[in-house]
Amino acid sequence: MAQITERRLVIVVRPTRLDELVARFNTIGQARFYVESLGADFSDYVAEHEHYRNALQLTDDALREIGRVHRLQRAHLPSYLFGPTDIVVVLGQDGLVANTLKYLNGQAIVGVNPDPARWDGVLLPFTPKDVGAAVRDHLAERRPISEIVMARAALNDGQELFAVNDLFVGPRSHVSARYVLALGQREERQSSSGVIVSTGLGSTGWMQSIYAGWAGMNAALLGTKPPADSRFAWDSAELRFCVREPFPSRSSQTELVFGRVTGAETLCITSLMPENGTIFSDGIEADCLGFNSGAIATIGVANRRGLIVV
């Protein structure tokens, strides 16, 4: 069958849990021994691996009927140069879609759920059986595209980091972060375990767990229970931040611990940490900026948007 496009089709893939175990223990046999010696079910690792590999083969076969296919491992995303006309297909989970979006600029993602019985796939509307039709529709501009607002952290040395779900600003280890936090005319010197800044897409993730804990404490201590739901729209041009475990003292305040960052407004955080300060995005600690004394982070709504084919 003749291919219908000259545009490159990039399939973003990830290692399975079994792949990671074999990388650690060298062989499947040694991996099996390790897992079963702990009383766990090794067959679940094998089943997940086989589902993913079968899904990858089905996806690859479908896309090779459309155009040139290139497979890209998740680990290579930070250094990969996507072309402006690339069609990007992500073979999930949801976190892989979020991680991929950070490295795109105008290219839309076709999210594929390799195992719907295992993964919810909020960002994965397609299966390997219908990915071919979805990509053809996308090429013909017959599919709608959802827009996702992203966050951007820019340092005063010119470095920047984008986030699809959230940014973490704080210490690398379990020690207190010290910094000055400013929003508009308000400013506080704080000591905490870090600051979470969430997008609408990320509002059901890390931010939701913080919100749920706050709601539970209100119910237990005050007898009131606010709605334990932090969600806001993916395309809402705002961010929300929350300070984790703020500590009140003579030199640190705890009033500016939650808020919204909208429009052209920015959240400014100045590091007071001599070492081990970090900013990372979307739960991936290796995808980070150093944030030590002298560093100033300006955090706001990013100018670019993530695009997902639906």
Image (tube, rainbow, N blue to C red):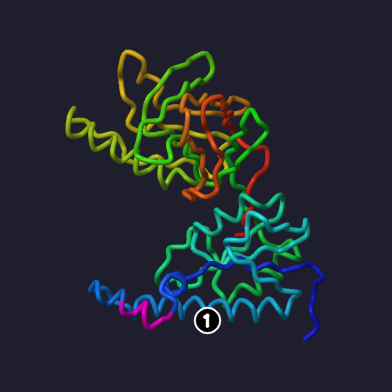
Q: Is residue 183 visible from the viewing direction of this image?
A: yes
Residue at 48 percent across and 45 percent down: it is: 202
Q: Is residue 275 above or below residue 53?
A: above
Range of residues picked out in magenta: 27-33
Asked whether 272 or 211 is in front, the reply is 272
Q: Residue furthest front?
A: 274
* Count of all numbered marks drawn on residues in the image: 1
Q: Is residue 53 above or below residue 265?
A: below
Residue at 57 percent across and 29 percent down: it is: 297
Q: Residue furthest bottom?
A: 1
Residue at 67 percent across and 63 percent down: it is: 88
Q: Quadrant of residue 32?
A: bottom left
Asked whether 67 or 177 is in front, the reply is 177
| x and y, in percent, of residue 150 in the image | 59, 42
Determine the main secondary structure of the stretch shown in magenta. Answer: helix
Indicate left or right for 211 with 113 as reference: left
Asked whether 260 or 69 is in front, the reply is 69
Q: Amino acid at mark 1?
A: Asn
Secondary element at tag 1: helix
| x and y, in percent, of residue 217 in the image | 23, 34
Q: Is residue 150 magenta?
A: no
| x and y, in percent, of residue 307 in the image | 64, 52
Indicate left or right for 210 with 185 as reference: left
Estimate how packed mark 1 is, as few (under 14), some (14 to 19) or many (20 or more) residues with alpha carbons within 10 Å: some
Quarter of the image with the N terminus is bottom right
Indicate left or right for 58 with 29 as reference: right
Residue at 78 percent across and 56 percent down: it is: 84
Q: Is residue 269 visible from the viewing direction of this image?
A: no
| x and y, in percent, of residue 120 in the image | 43, 63
The residue carrying mark 1 is: 54
Quarter of the image with the C terminus is bottom right
